[in-house]
Image (tube, rainbow, N blue to C red):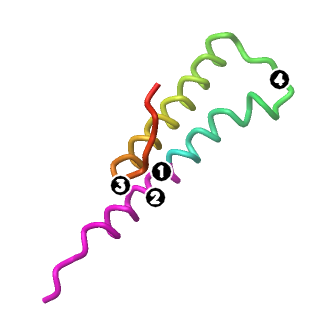
């Protein structure tokens, strides 16, 4: 039996998980940007933190398959 190729399989998983995290970030931010209602400061902060967490997770997934980033 042929051995599974590590790179394409790992890259596919990183891509798919990154896409899921992107959707999570979008869902957190969209109401803040497109909704006319007011949010409490706590809710705005919670949503911003969720989006930041999603972006950081995306960066880690992509770095795990070779994406070059400059950590700040």
Mark 2, residue position: 15
Q: Is residue 72 above or below residue 70?
A: above
Residue 62: x %, y % from top left: 42, 49
**Mark 4 or mark 2, which has the lower sequence index?**
2
* Numbered circle sitting on residue 18: 1
Circles 1 and 2 in contact, beta carbons < 8 Å:
yes
| Magenta segment boundaries in residue numbering | 1-20
Mark 3, residue position: 65
Circles 4 and 1 in contact, beta carbons < 8 Å:
no
Residue 3: x %, y % from top left: 16, 80
**Mark 3 or mark 4, which has the lower sequence index?**
4
Circles 2 and 3 in contact, beta carbons < 8 Å:
yes
Q: How many marks?
A: 4
Q: Residue at x 33, y 49 (%)?
A: 64
Mark 3: few, some, or many residues within 10 Å (few <14, many ≥20)?
Answer: some
Judge from the rendering whether residue 4 lies leftward or rightward of residue 44; answer left or right.
left
Element class at badge 1:
helix
In this view, the mark in front (2 or 3) = 3
Mark 2: few, some, or many residues within 10 Å (few <14, many ≥20)?
Answer: some
């Amino acid at each position: 039996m042929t051995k599974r190729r590590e790179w394409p399989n790992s890259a596919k998983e990183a891509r798919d998980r990154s896409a899921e995290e992107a959707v999570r970030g979008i869902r957190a931010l969209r109401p803040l940007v497109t909704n006319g209602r007011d949010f409490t400061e706590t809710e705005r902060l919670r949503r911003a933190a969720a989006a930041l967490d999603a972006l950081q997770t995306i960066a880690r997934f992509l770095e795990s398959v070779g994406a070059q980033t400059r950590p700040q």
